[in-house]
Image: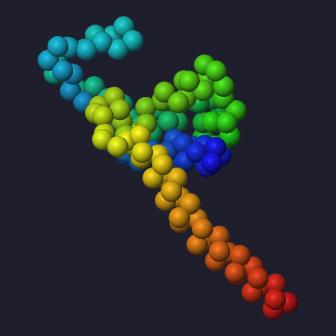
Amino acid sequence: MTYLQAVIKEGMRWHPPVASMLSKKVPATGDEWKGDTFPPGTEVGYCAWSVMHDEKFWGEDHGEFRPERWLEADGPRLKAIDATPDPSFWEWAVAVPGQERGGDRVEQAFVEVSEPLLLLWMSADKIASSSV
């Protein structure tokens, strides 16, 4: 399942499920992130597509669908790409109940949809080869 997980992660990177700006209000106590201070009530956010296609972070192949990037990364690089905000569950804004099982459901759905398609493809291949 390792390659399947890489395909799913790359799919989420390639086409983030959220098209608009993701934002939240800074709490009444204010907030700080990487040395920047944000006053209470400030709207802060990011554009998921921009984050997931940033050449400085993802490299020259940022515009390519390449699941292998998740398998080739190790050490600090793997930690960095795994820490990239996941717009499907956007932990920074809110903790979503059951989010740790969400990835399992995506994998299950992928397998359940793929199996009938694979069987259909195999049947079509058999029909085509038997009529020759």
Can residue 51 be seen by looking at this rendering? yes
Q: Which residue corresponds to the image point at 52% horizontal and 52% vertical from the top-left? A: 107
Counting from the top left corner in percent of width and height, residue 127 is at: 75, 86
Can residue 65 be seen by looking at this rendering? no
Q: Is residue 20 above or below residue 85?
A: below
Q: Quadrant of residue 94?
A: top left
Q: Nearer the viewer, residue 70 or 105?
A: 105
- Please indicate whether residue 114 sits to the left or right of residue 130 in the image: left
Q: Is residue 15 above or below residue 112?
A: above
Q: Which residue corresponds to the image point at 60% horizontal and 43% vertical from the top-left? A: 6
Q: Quadrant of residue 37?
A: top left
Q: Which residue corresponds to the image point at 29% horizontal and 31% vertical from the top-left? A: 93
Q: Nearer the viewer, residue 85 or 96?
A: 96
Name the residue furthest right. 132
Counting from the top left corner in percent of width and height, residue 2 is at: 64, 43
Question: Which colour style is shown?
Answer: rainbow
Name the residue furthest bottom. 131
Counting from the top left corner in percent of width and height, residue 24 is at: 24, 30
Q: Which residue corresponds to the image point at 47% horizontal and 52% vertical from the top-left? A: 106
Q: Quadrant of the C terminus?
A: bottom right
Q: Nearer the viewer, residue 92 or 106?
A: 106
Q: Is residue 14 above or below residue 91?
A: below
Q: Is residue 75 above or below residue 124?
A: above
Q: How many marks?
A: 0
Q: Nearer the viewer, residue 105 or 80?
A: 105
Counting from the top left corner in percent of width and height, residue 66 is at: 65, 43
- Please indicate whether residue 123 sits to the left or right of residue 31 in the image: right
- Please indicate whether residue 80 sits to the left or right of residue 29 in the image: right
